[in-house]
Amino acid sequence: MQYKSAIPAKILGYSVVAGYNSDKNPRNWVLQGSNDGQTWTDIHTRSNITFSQRGERKTYPVSPAVKYSYFRLNVTKLSNTSSNELITGELELHGTALASADVISNKGVIVSAEFADRSASEGVSMLIDKSENSKYCNAFYGSAWVGYQLPVPVKINAYSITSANDEEKRDPRSWTLDASVDGVNWDRIDARNDQKFLYRGATQFYACNKNRKEYTYFKLDIIENNSANLLVQLAEWQLLNIEGAGGEPTKIEVVAAESFNVYPNPVKEILYIDMPERGSALVYNISGNKLFQTELNAGSQSIRLDDLTPGFYLFKIQIRGKVITEKILKK
């Protein structure tokens, strides 16, 4: 399972959720990061993990030193070793992801808040300083809003909130996001309830503004924090226009799996592939490192694997940007 982040992220932890088939849950895996989608670094490894029920979530903290744009969970063993299909409910990545430039950067934004700043070091301007180590912290008596006013209208389709560096009980929990052209008439472009930040400095993204309108004013009204505490705090509030965020599901062109055949498996020397059309063949070791790649024409093709040491490998076919994967055993 692979994910490309629109904003390079420093991962703080991740969660794996069990799927509906206990025989096909992941048992051994490596979480990896990359900045080019080709060279991968191991971030976290787990072995002999068992899920007791469908939908069970297991969360693991990590502490990498660098940011990555690509993440993948390389599953090397399933709960039932005879299974040849992975089923998992969810892969959640938790991390810090602050854009070097969002839609309000360098636009002369005016930042405001319902309550005057308690101190300059924790004032409302900290929301746009691009640092998870600073924060806005102020009074909370059942609600508290912060706002952005821009000199020109902008179109957003997502926003993010980054939790502050301490005091989980001060995190925003429920809120509304309103937008306006004139500062008088407001449209509700998103609302969230019962949100949870698992880590300090964690950036969480939310799709919004389904009508794709342009606005000049934005107001985040926090209506519940994480406890009865009389303070609310957050490190950053970003307004974003991310390709694909919040839109209708993208139509995916699928290469029919039944038209793709690899044999024999296990294989000793030569692997045969029935290609439905021209594409690329890639072989990875079980750690996820690419060993070689070659181009194959449509029809019955073959690849010599006698130079590989015995063991399991991942064989991938790429056709028109789509990927089909088979696990093969080299004798």
Image (cartoon, rainbow, N blue to C red):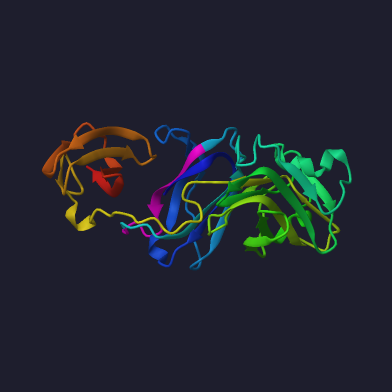
Q: What residue sits 39% from the left and 60% below the top?
A: 87
Residue found at x 38% / y 63%: 23
Q: Nearer the viewer, residue 70 or 77?
A: 70
Q: In the displayed structure, would residue 86 be above or below residue 52? A: above
Q: Nearer the viewer, residue 55 or 270?
A: 55
Is residue 310 left or right of 93 when viewed as pictured?
left
Residue 183 placement: quadrant: bottom right
Can residue 205 be seen? no
**Foreground of the two, 214 or 97:** 214
**Residue 85 shows in this picture:** yes
Image height of 210 relative to 281, above or below = below
Q: Position of residue 262 (x, y in %)?
A: 18, 49
- Taken as a whole, is the magenta stretch helix, strand or loop? strand
User: How many marks do you count on the picture?
Assistant: 0
Indicate the quadrant containing the C terminus: top left, top right, bottom left or bottom right.
top left
> Residue 294: x percent and y percent?
22, 34
**Which of 81 and 264 lies nearest the eye of the viewer?**
264
Q: Position of residue 176 (x, y in %)?
A: 68, 61
Who's the residue at 43% across and 67% down the image?
20
Report the residue at 29% width, 42% height from top: 311
Residue 173 image position (x, y, % from top left)? 71, 60
Question: The magenta stretch spans which residues?
Answer: 69-83
For this view, does 146 lie left or right of residue 14? right
Taking the magenta stretch, the answer to whether it contains residue 79 is yes
